[in-house]
Amino acid sequence: MRAVDIIEKKRDNLKLSDTEIEFLLNEYLTGNIPDYQMSAFLMGVYFNDMTKEELLKFTMVMRDSGDVIKFDEIDRFLVDKHSTGGVGDKVTVILSPILSALGMGNVKLSGKGLGHTGGTIDKFESIKGFKFSTTKEELVKIANKTGVGLMGYSDKIVPLDKKLYSLRDVTATVPSIPLIASSIMSKKLAIYSDVIILDVKVGDGAFMKDLEQAKKLAERMIEIGKGAGRKVKVVLSNMDEPLGHAIGNANEIIEAIEFLKGNGASDVKEVVYTITGLALKEKGEISELSEAKEKIDEVIKNGTALKILAEFIGESGGNKDLINDYGLLPKARYVMEIFSENEGYIKKIKTEEIGKAAMIIGAGRAKKEDEVDHAVGINIFRKVGEKIGKNEKIAEIYYNDDKNVNESKNMVIDAFVITSEKVEEPKAIFEIIE
Ligand code: URA
């Protein structure tokens, strides 16, 4: 078998066999097929797509390039919630203890933030002493105590994705639906769970800018899940404004804790309640999503979910008292208040712009190797659909170094698009695909 023949078939839109896909990927992983041939193949996929059978095989070979983990030692209904990446997305921090309080377990691999989007690892690492599990054994130990099992991605899980993603990044083949679907799903299939719930972000601050593309991606990921015998549900959620109010790390932990104290922003609530509802439905505890509300409200009201978050922090090496003492979190030295320059209705909050405004003061990474300053970030006080007057406070920037703060301020002001016409409050969830 020769790589050039496989590339030629993809170029001419002919169907590849399982053996050809196995050969191509395995030989690429071992270095026997060079980057230039794989690049040509990826470009072929970009233009000619993959059939259902090709995509499933491609994803399974990717999955099997590394460890596949099964959590037989955890006696809970296991949920793997995954977000495609957003701004202000603290859902995992909130959802995990809620799922646990409702008798389930959230087991997942978490990622670090890159570019304008944040990552769960960075948010938790703003807690002094907090260490993510790096092995299955550590994860199982903590998950058995708390119902929360988060682990960082390791090189042992789907090593092929890392190699392929780096190549896609420099060959303009990242925005290909089958390649994104296989990249995400290979990592989801590498960890066993009873249900995979994908939060596909859509809009200005997301990878998928429009709803039609996001739907296509969702359908292909569900198709892969089905082929692999796994249950996948998808929510398509709004990224045309940051989720909630805090964008950063320590400030997002505070917002998550406040949510569990009953002070959640309505858009975060819609996302968390819907995903929890989907999990409860799959577990067979409810038949309609609306039935989830009473159950979630109960574990928030009686403090169980908050207590579980505190236990998870404690078990992971952090000080659990921080849930009542935010002084234990890193705090930026300076605050800059931002005021609106116009009056009217907020039509849009350019989300990528806000994410970048937070990144340039140190809350995120421009490059993978950059260090994050966990104390810094941005809080926005007003949301899309709200009416504001001139000179009203719209945001605060928390910063330690004034190097980029004026640029960040201008970006935040520019991100708030104000109009004189009334604007409806947007939905946080556009669609649910089960
Ligand atoms: N997230 C992934 O894990 N892979 C992609 O290709 C895109 C987003």
Image (cartoon, rainbow, N blue to C red):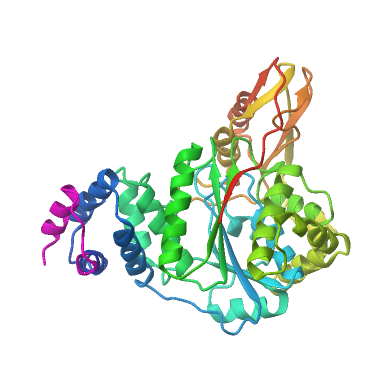
Where does residue 383 sit, x and y in percent of width and height? 72, 33
Mark yes or no: residue 376 visible: yes
Q: How many marks?
A: 0
Instruction: Residue 18: say if magenta.
Output: yes
Q: Which image quadrant for residue 24?
A: bottom left
Q: Is residue 389 left or right of residue 141?
A: right
Q: Nearer the viewer, residue 282 or 308?
A: 282
Residue 399 visible somewhere in the drawing = no
Residue at 77%, 22% in the rendered image: 388
Instruction: From the viewer's perspective, tell me whether residue 159 is left or right of residue 214.
Output: left
User: From the viewer's perspective, is residue 57 above or below residue 243?
Assistant: below
The reply to whether the magenta stretch includes residue 285 is no
Eyeballing the image, is 424 above or below 28?
A: above
Quarter of the image where the N terminus is located: bottom left
Q: Position of residue 44 (x, y in %)?
A: 23, 48
Which corner quadrant holds the C terminus?
Answer: bottom right
Instruction: Point out the residue furthest to the right here.
Output: 302
Residue 228: image quadrant is: bottom left
Range of the magenta residues? 1-20
Instruction: Say which of 2 and 413 sits in front.
Output: 2
In the rendered view, tell whether residue 300 sits above or below residue 268: below
Q: Position of residue 369 (x, y in %)?
A: 46, 53
Q: Locate residue 406, reporting x and y percent.
A: 62, 28
| Residue depicted at 74% across the width and 16% down the height | 343
Residue that protrudes farthest toward the bottom in the picture: 73
| Image position of 87 with respect to 134: above or below | above
Q: Nearer the viewer, residue 162 or 95?
A: 95
What type of secondary structure mainly makes up the magenta span? helix
